[in-house]
Amino acid sequence: MTRKQDIRTENKLKFHVFQDERFVDLNLYQFGWERTEPLHSYGPHARNHYLFHYVIAGRGVLYANDESYAIEAGHGFLIVPGAPTTYVADEKDPWEYTWIEFDGLRAGESLGLAGISGRQPVYTPLNREAGRLLQEQMLTIVNHADASPIRQIGQGFLFLDQLVQSSAGRRQQSQRRLRDFYMKEALSFIEQNYQQDISIEEIAAFCGLNRSYFGKVFRDTMGESPQAFLLHYRMARAAQMLKETTLPVGTIAGMVSYSNQLHFSRAFKAVYGMAPRSYRQTHFIRPEETP
C-alpha cells in the first residue's frame, strides 16, 4: 500500500507528498496548490529534484542565476536540482499557484523540449488557452491525491506532455526521428547491459556513431551526458533493489557493475544523498505494503 502525506488548509493550501519511488522514467515527489500571503517567500534553497510552479493569479519575483525574473499570472517558473533559488510573492498582489516536484530519467528530455531550463527558468504559454490546459492538468494531479500510484504517474506524463505542447519556447523537432532512433538504440543497450562494465565508447559504437557526436546527440535529447544518465540509471536500479529485496549491499553493488562496495556507496550517496544502508532503512517496502 502506498503511503502518502496529505496536509490541507481548505482555502489557502493543498499539499501532498508522493512516497512511492519505484518509478524510474518519471517520479513525483510532492505537489500542491497555494494562495500565498503578501511577501510570502521561500529560499534561498537548493532542491534535489525539478520543481515547476504555474501561477494562476497574482505576481512575484524569482531570484536565480544572479538574476531576477518577474512572474505573473499565466506564466510559470522552473527550479532545477542543486541550484539555490528564492521566490517572493508581491506585496499587493500575491501569488496563487500550483506546483509539482518531479524527477526521472525522462524529465530532462521533456524540459529541454519545452525550452525551459536552469538558465531559462521562465515558462510562457503559446496562448491563454494553452496555459489554462496546463493549469487544469496540474490541478488534476493535486485534486486526485488518492488515485493509485500508476494513475498519478500517468497524469505526470500528461503534465509533461502539456508542458511541452503549450510552451512558447518549445524546441523545434527537425531531425527528431533519426535522433529518436539513436536514443532508443542507446537506451536499449543500457537497459540490457548496465550490469556490465560498459563504456560510453561501446554505447556509441552500438549506435554506429563516434563518441563525440553521440555525446552531443545524447545531451541534446536527454538533457544530460551519457555518463550522468548511466550513473543515474544504475543507481535507480540499485535503489529499487534496496527497497524491494534483502540482498546484501555488496551483492547489489555487483549487480549494477560496481566490484568495489565503497565506490558504489559513494556513487549512491552522491545521487540520493544518503548511504545505501540508510536508504534501505528509510525506504524498505515490506511484503504486506506491496500493492
Image: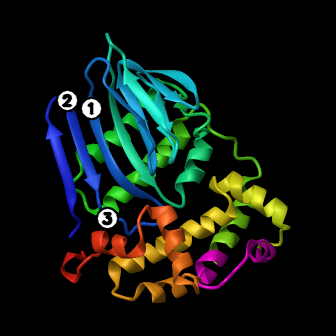
Q: Residue furthest right?
A: 210
Residue 72 on image: x %, y %: 43, 20
Per the image, the residue denoted by label 3 is 20
- Check if residue 28 falls in the magenta segment: no
Taking the spot 73% from the left edge, 66% from the top edge, the residue there is: 182
- Residue 236 lies, with reference to residue 117, above or below; the image says below
Q: What stretch is highlighted in magenta?
A: 189-206
Taking the spot 41% from the left edge, 74% from the top edge, the residue there is: 276
Per the image, the residue denoted by label 2 is 12
What is the chief secondary structure element of the magenta stretch?
helix
In the image, taking residue 188 as reference, residue 125 lies left or right, namely left
In the image, taking residue 135 as reference, residue 160 lies left or right, namely right
Residue 180 on image: x %, y %: 69, 61
- Specify which label sits upstream in the sequence, 3 or 1: 3
- Check if residue 198 falls in the magenta segment: yes
Instruction: Check disc 3: other Cα within 10 Å, few if <14, some if 14-19, many if 20+.
Output: some
- Residue 15 lies, with reference to residue 152, above or below; the image says above
Residue 202 on image: x %, y %: 77, 77
Location of the N terminus (image quadrant): bottom left
- Specify which label sits upstream in the sequence, 2 or 1: 2
Q: What residue type is labelled 1?
A: Glu
Per the image, the residue denoted by label 1 is 34
Of residue 260 and residue 145, the one placed in the foreground of this image is 260
